[in-house]
Amino acid sequence: MTQVLLYDVLRQGLWVAVQISAPLLAVALVVGVVIGLFQALTSIQEMTLTFVPKVGVMLAVFWVSMSFMTTTLITFFTSRIVPLIGGS
């Protein structure tokens, strides 16, 4: 395995990680901002008000996007990693 091939596979692996984590991170950001605005407007400073809805929405988005995540990982492994392991 050459150094160029190694860096290319690492680059693609990092890009797959970004693609897979993007839906969860985007939802966490949006829910965090909305709850932060709600807390600022109502002067309610309860920690569970921030944590519980964010975790609930992230679990729902994870459940919805599981097929996308699985397909992306399977495609990456079958097209890049498995041929490297097999030596072709």
Image (cartoon, grey):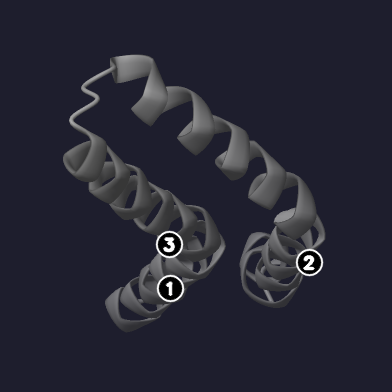
In the image, is 46 to the left or to the right of 79? Answer: left
**Picture quadrant where residue 65 is located:** bottom right
Label at residue 48:
none
Bin the neighbour count of mark 1 within 10 Å (Cα to Cα): few under 14, some 14-19, many 20 and up. Answer: few
The residue that mark 3 highlights is: 26
Q: CA distance from mark 3 to mark 2?
A: 20 Å
Q: Residue at x 49, y 24 (%)?
A: 52
Look at label 3 and name its amino acid. Answer: Ala
Residue 56 coordinates in the image, percent (x, y): 60, 33
* Dot placed on the residue nearer the N-terminal end, 3 or 2: 3
Other residues around mark 3 within 10 Å, as few (<14) / some (14–19) / many (≥20): few
Q: Which residue is mark 2?
A: 71
Is disc 2 surrounded by few (<14), some (14 to 19) or many (20+) residues within 10 Å? few
Q: CA distance from mark 1 to mark 2?
A: 14 Å
Residue 16 at x, y percent in the picture:
51, 68
Are dots 3 and 2 in contact, CB under 8 Å?
A: no
Q: Earlier in the sequence, mark 1 or mark 2?
A: 1
Which residue shows up at 65% across the image and 70% down it?
76
Q: How many marks?
A: 3
From the viewer's side, name the closer residue of 75 and 41.
41
Residue linked to disc 1 = 15
